[in-house]
Structure formats: structure tokens, C-alpha cells
């Protein structure tokens, strides 16, 4: 079985009380069965990581399935060892305490020197070398003779002779070191000492009882001396005890799912529950975030002024068909596709459409796009959109349509040029940041050398008795001047550093998650949205944290013994101030909005009418595209 980070890994048994008709989840290559989908997914994600090692060949940095393939190939190579050599080789392996390299060398040397029954080699016959096979070893010690069978066609023995060892000729070793290494690993259940699989020992009649004292001159406990008064029975008990697999000490961090609680672990806080108060379907939140972030990131290129995530969500869920926010968003994407003369442009030309999207005609352009996509889930809504009833389309489907439009927009040449430009800007900013760091180090080194030199001068002056009051004042003024100038330079460097980081963040091509927790949930933070979003491993469930208290509780619940949560905690530490400030700002804005709504409600009870145009929750109705093409 493959090794997990070079340590044994055991598969899970089937669930208890499993009903034959019960629906379960099964890992294809391990046949493990799970009732819970999340547990199945966690296990599958673990198998996909490159942390597995082939037990036979030692090849590492593999997935579990790749390690299985490597083991199968290594096992096939191990079986290339000639059958007549298996019994003597297995006898040399059983209960040997040599390390793998030394054991391979010992077996290899023995095969070169010793001759075994069944061994095929060459011998002199009538003045020429002929292939033969040892049929029987006669005698012992230095007087050994060998009955050989001369091999003819079809590998058949045609005659026999009795020869001395000097008459036998070996042209090559009967097995390579690599074959022996694979064979040893494949034939044993453990090492130190090496113990054969029970079925192999039984097949070749090899004793499974540990030797009483010594084996082939090798100590049973390498590097240790046996007790003077120890008996054979004591040695056997000690060997059996050491033969049991001892779990090596765990080196953290390790995979999060393998972390086990310990008595000296710090107390982790309870992870706060996620808020799932979305107006759009939960499985569509990813599309909502993607579309919104794309529109904000490339607003200047699209000629589409910014809007909030809440405004887009409210507009998507509204039943009105001609909301300005949605019309402008679709129109901006249509204009980009038309300008690029893409497939959509050709489709419109065949329809003989005017290439200008307006508030009146935008539904026709949208229905044409859905018709061009020719997807069943879109095709059934073409007539609804064409009749002007876009607002009746399901919010999840509206987001899928926008996602398809964004996917098409990403392929346009104008957007690719913008991406290349941002890549160049990022590289320039990164180079400027590296140059800033180099200059900072040089200045620090010069300041340290200057300070050391000043210290030497002060000492010399004190020793010579020439430290006058005037000199002391000059030295103090110089020192104060150095402190002031270094302070100013430090402030300037801090400003430059923050400026570079801000610029690089603004020029980022696409958002990336802060990290993952132990269950592979991804954590997202967007610059213009004061929430920390959490995406499930299968991307079907979303939630968010919206308060600083929740952020602190999340931070305290992460276990740094796991690789994923350790990296996530480090990233949260790095972005803590930025995220917490965004959360607090959003909370203050929400409180201010509630106060306004309460004031409007009180005023409406006096005038018996709700002034909807002033309601902050309806701000999406007042959207105006200030960057619209003239």
C-alpha cells in the first residue's frame, strides 16, 4: 500500500450495519465506502494531494492513485527475479537486521558467488561454451560437484554431465540490484528486522520463528549488546516486541485531517456559524461574486461605473424587467463583444440587427445571445425574454446568463490587452518594491557603519581629554540630525512600501482565496465588500462572516498543526487590519441605513405614504452609469 509522507497508511473499513440497498459513496481505487458525502469528499481530496510515496520503488510526490500504479509496476519488476533464486534469497531476507542497501549488496554478492539448483549459466563442452542448467548440487564444502543439464532448442535439457565449479561460467549476475530492492520490499511486511509475508514463508517452507541468538553474524539488535544473563527466550520476546510497528513521532504541520488532539494543545475557540442570508440561491453566490468583481475590476474598459454587491443582488432578485443597473451591465458586455467582432457580432449581422443596444432593444440582444448559446436551460427562456418579461426569469438563471457573458468577454482582444497591461504593471511594481528593499538595506548598513564610527570618535575624544562642551554640542546636534533624517526617510519608506502594496492589490488580475480550512472550505475577501466569504469544498454552499467578533473567533479556531489552517491563519494575520476595518465599516453603514429607514418609516406614518425613492435598501433603483459611452 502507498505510504503517506513515508509512513504507513491504513484504509477505512466498511461502515457498520451497512444495508445492501443503502446509497453510499465509494472511492474508486480504494473501494472505501462512506455514508456522509463530506467525509467522502475529504478523503478523496486527501488522495489527490501529492504527499504519497510508492512503498516498493520509493518514488515520492505522487497522488494516491499514481502511487498505486508505481507499486504495480515495481511489483512486476520484482517478479522478474528467476524462480530458482527466490527460495535462497527469501532465506537471506527473513529476520535480517541490515538496512535495505546493505541487504541488497549482501544478497547480490551471494548470488554472484554461490551456485543454486535451477540456476541457468554456461559451461565448457567440447571446447565451446554451451548454455546449461544446474540440476543438482553434489557434496558440500570445497568438494562440491554440480550435475548440469545441457540446454538445447525450446529450452529443453538434452543431456547431463557432472562438472566442477571451475568449469561453470557466469556471464552476468542473475538479478540486478534494482530488481532485488523491489523484490525485498514486495516480499516483506516490515523491516528492522525484515519479516516475510506469511504466505511466502509458508510457500517456500521458511521458518517464521525468530532466531534465538544471531543470524548470519548480524546482531538481532543492530548497535546493541545482548545481556550477559539473557536467555534465548528473552531474546525472542524482545525481538517480537520490537517487530511490532512503532509509530514514529509526528512532525507538524501535517495534513489537517490527520491532526490528533494532544494534552498540551492550546484551547481553540469554537468556530462561529456562517451567515447564509443571501437573496439569490446559495449555489449561485459564486456566480454573483464573480460577475460583480469582474464589472468592478474592468469597469473603465466596459464604461460601467461601480455598484455595490447588494445592489446587484437586489437587482437580480427584482421582478422588474428594465432595471437600469441590469440593462447597463448587459449592454456594456454586449458592446464589448460587438466591438471585438466575435461570434456574437457575426450572429447579430445575420439577424440584421443595429449594433447599438438601448433600453428598448436590449431584450432582443439578450434573446439573440441566449439563442446563440443554444443551451437547453437558456433556450426555454428565449421567448420569455423576447416578450419583455426578463424580470420573471429565475435569479439563479439570470446569474448563469451573466456568467456566460463574462466568460465570452474574457476572450475578447480588448480584455486580453488590458490583462497584459496589468501584468506589465504588476511586474514593474514588484521590481520597484524589490529595489526599495535593496536600497533600504544599503542605507541601514551605512547608518550602522556611521554609528559605529561616531562611537569610536567619542571614545577617542574622551581618552584624549579633548571632549569640550562645544564638541559635545556638535556631536549631539549631528546625532539629533541623523535621528531626524533617518526618521523622515523611514516614514518615506513606509509610505512607498504601502503605496507599492496598494498599487499591486489594485492591479491584481483576479481575486484569490486567502486559504482553506481543514475541510477544504475556501475563504474569500474582496476589497470593496465588507464581508469574509466562505465557499464549501464542492462550491455548492456559501456563507459569510460580517463582524470583527466573528473574525476573531475564526482566527482563534484555526489549528496551526494542520498545513491548510496554518497557511490560512498566517494570511489572516497579514490581512487582519484590512479585513477588520472593512467589517466594522460595513457594520456602521448598516446601522446608519437602519436609522434612515426607521426615520423614513416614522415620517411615512405621518404623511400616510412611504417615500420609496429615499429608502436606502432601494438604492439599486437609482443607479446611474456615469461612465456610459457618449
Image (cartoon, grey):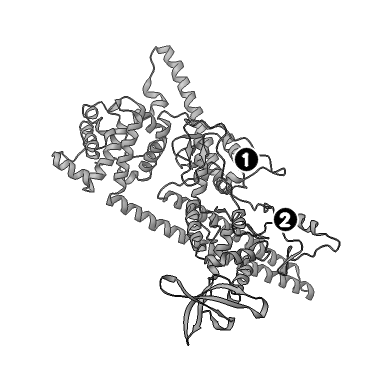
In the picture, measured across the screen, residue 41 lies left or right of residue 360, that is right
In what element is the residue under mark 1?
helix
| 548 and 542: which is toward the camera | 542
Q: Which residue is mark 2?
A: 242
Residue 112 appears in the picture as rendered: yes
> Can you give x and y, in whole percent of width and height, for residue 386 in the image?
21, 29
Q: Dot 2, how many residues are within 10 Å of its Cα: few (below 14), some (14-19), or many (20+)? A: few
Q: Nearer the viewer, mark 1 or mark 2?
A: 2
In the picture, the disc for residue 556 is: 1
> Can you give x and y, in whole percent of width and height, for residue 112 in the image?
58, 76
CB-based contact (under 8 Å), mark 1 and mark 2: no
| Quarter that holds the C terminus | top left
625, above or below 301, in the image: above
Residue 304 appears in the picture as rendered: no
In the picture, the disc for residue 196 is: none
> Can you give x and y, in whole percent of width and height, for residue 482 in the image?
63, 63
* Residue shown at the point (30%, 25%) measured from the top left: 392
* Residue shown at the point (49%, 36%) measured from the top left: 37
Circle nearer the N terminus (1, 2): 2
Amino acid at each position: 500500500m502507498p505510504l503517506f509522507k513515508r509512513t504507513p497508511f491504513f484504509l477505512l473499513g466498511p461502515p457498520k450495519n451497512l444495508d445492501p440497498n443503502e446509497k453510499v459513496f465509494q472511492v474508486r481505487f480504494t473501494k472505501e465506502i462512506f455514508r456522509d458525502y463530506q467525509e467522502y469528499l475529504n478523503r478523496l481530496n486527501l488522495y489527490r494531494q501529492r504527499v504519497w510515496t510508492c512503498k516498493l520503488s520509493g518514488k515520492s510526490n505522487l497522488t494516491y492513485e499514481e502511487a498505486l500504479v508505481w507499486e504495480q509496476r515495481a511489483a512486476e519488476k520484482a517478479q522478474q527475479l528467476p524462480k530458482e533464486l527466490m527460495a535462497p534469497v527469501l532465506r537471506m531476507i527473513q529476520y535480517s537486521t541490515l538496512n535495505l542497501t546493505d541487504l541488497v549488496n549482501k544478497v547480490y554478492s551471494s548470488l554472484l558467488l554461490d551456485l543454486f539448483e535451477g540456476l541457468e549459466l554456461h559451461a565448457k563442452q567440447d571446447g565451446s561454451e554451451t548454455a546449461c542448467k544446474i540440476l543438482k548440487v553434489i557434496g558440500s564444502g570445497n568438494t562440491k560437484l554440480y550435475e548440469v543439464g545441457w540446454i538445447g532448442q525450446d529450452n529443453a535439457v538434452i543431456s547431463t554431465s557432472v562438472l566442477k565449479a571451475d568449469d561453470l561460467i557466469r556471464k552476468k549476475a542473475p538479478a540486478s540490484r534494482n530488481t532485488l530492492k523491489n523484490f525485498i520490499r514486495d516480499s516483506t511486511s516490515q523491516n528492522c528486522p525484515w519479516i516475510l509475508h506469511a504466505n511466502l514463508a509458508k510457500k517456500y517452507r521458511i521458518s517464521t520463528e525468530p532466531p534465538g541468538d544471531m543470524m548470519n553474524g548480524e546482531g538481532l539488535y543492530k548497535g546493541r549488546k545482548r545481556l550477559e544473563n539473557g536467555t534465548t527466550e528473552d531474546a525472542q520476546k524482545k525481538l517480537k516486541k520490537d517487530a511490532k510497528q512503532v509509530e514514529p513521532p509526528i512532525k507538524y504541520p501535517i495534513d489537517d485531517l490527520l491532526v490528533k488532539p494532544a494534552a498540551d494543545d492550546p484551547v481553540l475557540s469554537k468556530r462561529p456559524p456562517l451567515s447564509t442570508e443571501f437573496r439569490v440561491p446559495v449555489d449561485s453566490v459564486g456566480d454573483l461574486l464573480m460577475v460583480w468583481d469582474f464589472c468592478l475590476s474592468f469597469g473603465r474598459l466596459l464604461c460601467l461605473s461601480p455598484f455595490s454587491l447588494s445592489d446587484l443582488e437586489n437587482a437580480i432578485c427584482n421582478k422588474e424587467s428594465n432595471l437600469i443597473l441590469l440593462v447597463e451591465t448587459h449592454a456594456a458586455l454586449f458592446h464589448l463583444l460587438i466591438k471585438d467582432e466575435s461570434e456574437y457580432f457575426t450572429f447579430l449581422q445575420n439577424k440584421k440587427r443595429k449594433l447599438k443596444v438601448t433600453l428598448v432593444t436590449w431584450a432582443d440582444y439578450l434573446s439573440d445571445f441566449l439563442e446563440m448559446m443554444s443551451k437547453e436551460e437558456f433556450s426555454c427562456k428565449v421567448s420569455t425574454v423576447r416578450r419583455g418579461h426578463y424580470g420573471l426569469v429565475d435569479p439563479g438563471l439570470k446569474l448563469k446568463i451573466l456568467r456566460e457573458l463574462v466568460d465570452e468577454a474574457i476572450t475578447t482582444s480588448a480584455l486580453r490587452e488590458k490583462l497584459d497591461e496589468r501584468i506589465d504593471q504588476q511586474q514593474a511594481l514588484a521590481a520597484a518594491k524589490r529595489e526599495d528593499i535593496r536600497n533600504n538595506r544599503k542605507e541601514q548598513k551605512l547608518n550602522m557603519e556611521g554609528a559605529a564610527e561616531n562611537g569610536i570618535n567619542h571614545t577617542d575624544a574622551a581618552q584624549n581629554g579633548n571632549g569640550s562642551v562645544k564638541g559635545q554640542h556638535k556631536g549631539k546636534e549631528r546625532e539629533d540630525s541623523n535621528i531626524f533624517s533617518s526618521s523622515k526617510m523611514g516614514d518615506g519608506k513606509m509610505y512607498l512600501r504601502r503605496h507599492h502594496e496598494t498599487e499591486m492589490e489594485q492591479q491584481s488580475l483576479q481575486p484569490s482565496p486567502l486559504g482553506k480550512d481543514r475541510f477544504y472550505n475556501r475563504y474569500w475577501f474582496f476589497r470593496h465588500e465588507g464581508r469574509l466569504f466562505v465557499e464549501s469544498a464542492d462550491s455548492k454552499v456559501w456563507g459569510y462572516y460580517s463582524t470583527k467578533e466573528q473574525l476573531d473567533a475564526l482566527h482563534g479556531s484555526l489549528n496551526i498543526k494542520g498545513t491548510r489552517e496554518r497557511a490560512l491563519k498566517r494570511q489572516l494575520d497579514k490581512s487582519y487590519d484590512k479585513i477588520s476595518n472593512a467589517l466594522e465599516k460595513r457594520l456602521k453603514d448598516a446601522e446608519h441605513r437602519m436609522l434612515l429607514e426607521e426615520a423614513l418609516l416614522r415620517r411615512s406614518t405621518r404623511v400616510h405614504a412611504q417615500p420609496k425613492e429615499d429608502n436606502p435598501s432601494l438604492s439599486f433603483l437609482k443607479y446611474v452609469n456615469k461612465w456610459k459611452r457618449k
